[in-house]
Amino acid sequence: MAKIGFIGTGIMGHPMALNLQKAGHSLFLSAHHDAAPADLIAGGAVALANPKEVAQEAEADGHQSLRRQNQRKRCSVPRRASVRR
């Protein structure tokens, strides 16, 4: 599976990272304020010192994935289709 960098494992990021880990992806973490959650580390995630190190280790990040999804959505709509009110 993919090596995914995850920056921020707080209220919103922790469940997202946990789902990625359950799906079999390797995670590289950088927490903003606190240490990386113990359950993610116990599951095999690697805690790194800063976002730069995460970017160097990861093949993908959440931002890139979302951008690709949005591009696919835009490409699936015919160019000349427009809604006029």
Image (cartoon, rainbow, N blue to C red):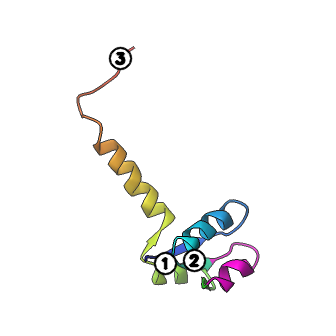
Q: Residue furthest right?
A: 34
Mark 1 falls on what kind of element? Answer: helix
Q: In this orientation, does residue 42 appear?
A: yes
Q: How many marks?
A: 3
Between disc 1 and disc 3, whose residue precedes?
A: 1
The residue indicated by pointer 1 is 55
**How would you rate the neighbour count of disc 3 (Cα within 10 Å): few for under 14, some for 14-19, many for 20 or more?**
few
Residues tagged 2 and 1 counted as in contact (Cβ below 8 A): yes
Mark carried by residue 51: 2
Label 1 sits on what residue type? Ala
The residue indicated by pointer 3 is 84
Residue 9 % position (x, y) = 67, 69
The image quadrant of residue 83 is top left
Mark 2 falls on what kind of element? Answer: helix
Q: Residue furthest top?
A: 85
Label 3 sits on what residue type? Arg
